[in-house]
Amino acid sequence: MKVPFLDLKPTHQALQSELEAAFRRVLASGNYILGTEVQAFEAEFAAYCGTRHCVGVGNGLDALQLILRAWGIGAGDEVIVPSNTYIATWLAVSHAGATPVPVEPLAATCNLDVARLAVAITPRTRAIIAVHLYGQPADMDAINAVAREHGLKVIEDAAQAHGARYKGRRAGSLGDAAGFSFYPGKNLGTLGDGGAITTNDAQLAEQLRAWRNYGSRSKYHNEFKGFNSRLDELQAALLRVKLPHLDAWNAARQQLALAYLNGLTDRAQTHHGEQYGNAQPNSDGLAGNGLVLPEVPHWASPVWHVFVVRSRQRDALQQQLAQAGIGTLVHYPIPPHLQPAYADAGYRSGDFPIAEQLHREVLSLPMYPQLGLTAQQQVIAALMAGTAHCP
Ligand SMILES: *Cc1c(COP(=O)(O)O)cnc(C)c1O
């Protein structure tokens, strides 16, 4: 039996009649941009995240960029970003006209190493973008404390973390503003592109409503040079069908993650899982079977957008799994600082060794709510067989 890395079809087949009804509702409304569906979704998603405001936008990249623009962050300013993230985090800063300043992660969690923040701050620094990578929240209290001390804004890149909790609070409510993506493969995805910003700042939300709509608050009055980046009415209607299921889908991911952690941990090693309570690094991180499993700090409730293991033989392991019919992906193969897109910044290989090591070693295993524990056992068995050959 083949096990795909991700299959979006079962989710949508299960909701087919509701999704079709939402489509028919929008079709019949005659209103296809910024209508009642967007308004209702914004209220529902803000309530879900525990924030006062939500502003629907065109995609996750724009969500991050528009926050920076609304704060007037641009040319001459610096914004701290993780050295290991999807390139969109960096591009949001670059497109706003500012300079991304990378900070290395903790290898154990793949999230920002707060101890490295202070040395990256200069008189030009205006903001920190913390990414909840792979669906695991970054250490937001510590990041907020550094930001407050230096008068910086904090943005959450929550594109992989819909529903994740940090000390009980939801991603999206943990900084000054947060950017979400509803790209189809995200934990909450639509049937196309979409994004949102959440914040408790009423003035920021008000400005963002103009930023996404040509700098206009009332029709044909353009106060500044805004963008066209609106969440589609149709996508909002589809998202309203899916949002009530998000917690159940995330719970299914958490069950799968626990089964991966239990199934892949060498029983002789420190036991992962159960309460997600084990934050101790396991020696050099290598378990007996040559895999490094994700570490979950006690304050984090991740939503496992992807389940990422590490191996020094990553490429060989990926090939062996492919031969066994198991789909995997690498998130991500090339760090942003070594992409041709950032050649102008003059970075070299070795500049961010932790990010570079992670990019060499990470492998994302099949993970989606309908994967099922039986198919997952096949993945675990193939991994145990595959890693047996690794030194
Ligand atoms: C997907 C993603 C984005 C960008 O979202 P789009 O909707 O594709 O623009 C930004 N940051 C992270 C971490 C992501 O995973």
Image (spheres, grey):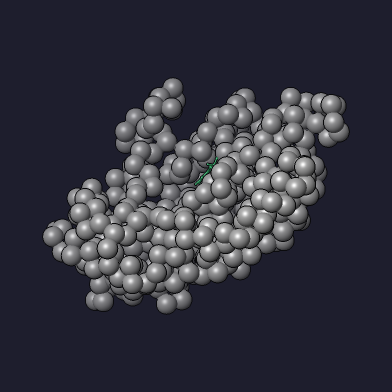
Res 307 quadrant in image: bottom left
Quadrant the C terminus occupies: bottom left
Q: Residue furthest top?
A: 344
Closer-to-camera residue (189/133):
189
Q: In the figure, 187 relative to 167: above or below?
A: above
Tell me, yes or no, if residue 199 can be seen here.
no
Tell me residue 217's x, y (percent). 83, 34
**Is residue 341 in view from this perspective?**
yes
Q: Nearer the viewer, residue 33 or 362?
A: 33
Total number of numbered discs in the rendering: 0
Residue drawn 67% across the image and 35% down it: 229
Give left or right: position of 350 versus 205: left
Coordinates of residue 75 in the picture (x, y in percent): 62, 25
- Is residue 117 left or right of 340 when viewed as pictured? right
Residue located 36% across and 59% down the image: 366
Q: Residue at x 33, y 67 (%)?
A: 375
Instruction: Report x, y in % for residue 334.
Output: 35, 38
What residue appears at the point 78 percent right and 26 percent down from the top-left corner? 224
Q: Nearer the viewer, residue 329 or 84?
A: 329
Taking the image as shown, residue 93 lies to the left or right of residue 35, namely: left
Residue 157 placed where, x, y %? Answer: 56, 47
Which quadrant holds the N terminus? bottom left
